[in-house]
Image: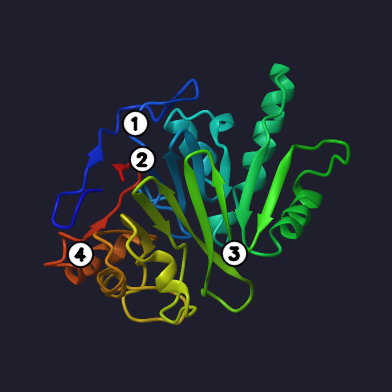
Amino acid sequence: VRSRGAPLRRLPRAERLVHGGEALFPSMTLTVLGSGTMMPVPGRYPSGYLLEAAGMVLLLDCSAPTIARLVEHRVNLHTVDLVCLSHFHTDHFGGLLPFIHARWVDDISTGRSHRPLTVLGPKELKKRFRQLRRVFWPEPKESYPVTFLEGPRRLQRGAARIRVFPIRHVPWFPSVGFRVEVGRRSLVYTGDLGAVQEPSFEAAIRRASALLIEAGALAPAPNHYTAGEAVNLAKRCHIPKVLLTHIRQENMPALKRAIRGQTDIATVVRDGDRIAI
């Protein structure tokens, strides 16, 4: 994503994101695996985004179709270093256990050593994963080296700096957003959110290079954002590009009307997009 007013740079869909663990793209590249909502439709699957940042491969949310979407993009599941989960609804969290279990089974089948994985997310992340594990992966002696890091924090992995900050979505559980920085480039991903946020929210996202944000609501709602709210937020926080996602296909005409005249700032992402940040 370039400066304000510059066109969005979409990389060719046919190119591979990762080959043998080596980065092919510039320092930050986003691949949209799923830009839809809970109900998948052809061309829009539930939430999942792959971010390559300074040699690291991060998964932002992991819905049930995410494994299939990664395979379709010819991404080796074992190359993912870090999974960032925004909240516990199934269209964002439901694919985590199958993702980890698939890596374990593949390692056992091929005789390969397990590659450690770090999972970032809200508080109760490890507890909820263990609850799923008891139901869907009951073998007590099987394990995978996963480190769970819960709640707001800052960490550095190589040249990538990651900030986890609180998000308000629903009252039933906590949610978080993520800011990933490499040099002067930065991407913010919010997950789902409501119009009323924490006092520190805008400071956490200010002056990012790009904002990947849900825009599924057609009218202001307590738990979801509209496209207009997303654009206004970006202007307040001096963010030059807004990538609108988490969209029901039937809402697309209304969403496009809402951002008419704002296309220098706002872009509706599609499944399969590969975007240089």
Q: Please, is residue 46 above or below residue 142 in the view? A: below
Q: Within 10 angstroms of label 1, few (less than 14), some, or many (20 or more) residues?
A: some
- Out of 185 and 16, give the one closest to the viewer: 185
Residue holding disc 2 = 29
| Mark 1 or 4, closer to the camera | 1
Distance (Cα) linking label 4 and label 2: 25 Å
Residue holding disc 3 = 152
Earlier residue among tags 3 and 2: 2
Task: Point out residue 251 in the picture as x, y percentages from the top left corner.
Answer: 29, 66
Residue at point 77% right, 49% down?
133
Residue at point 35% right, 46% down?
271
Q: Within 10 angstroms of label 2, few (less than 14), some, or many (20 or more) residues?
A: many
Q: Which mark is residue 258?
A: none
Do tag 2 and tag 1 residues touch (Cβ < 8 Å)?
yes
| Mark 4 or 2, closer to the camera | 2
Amino acid type indicated by mark 4: Lys
The image quarter in which residue 201 lies: bottom left
Residue at point 69% right, 17% down?
110
Distance (Cα) linking label 2 and label 1: 7 Å
Distance (Cα) linking label 1 and label 4: 30 Å
| Mark 3 or 2, closer to the camera | 3
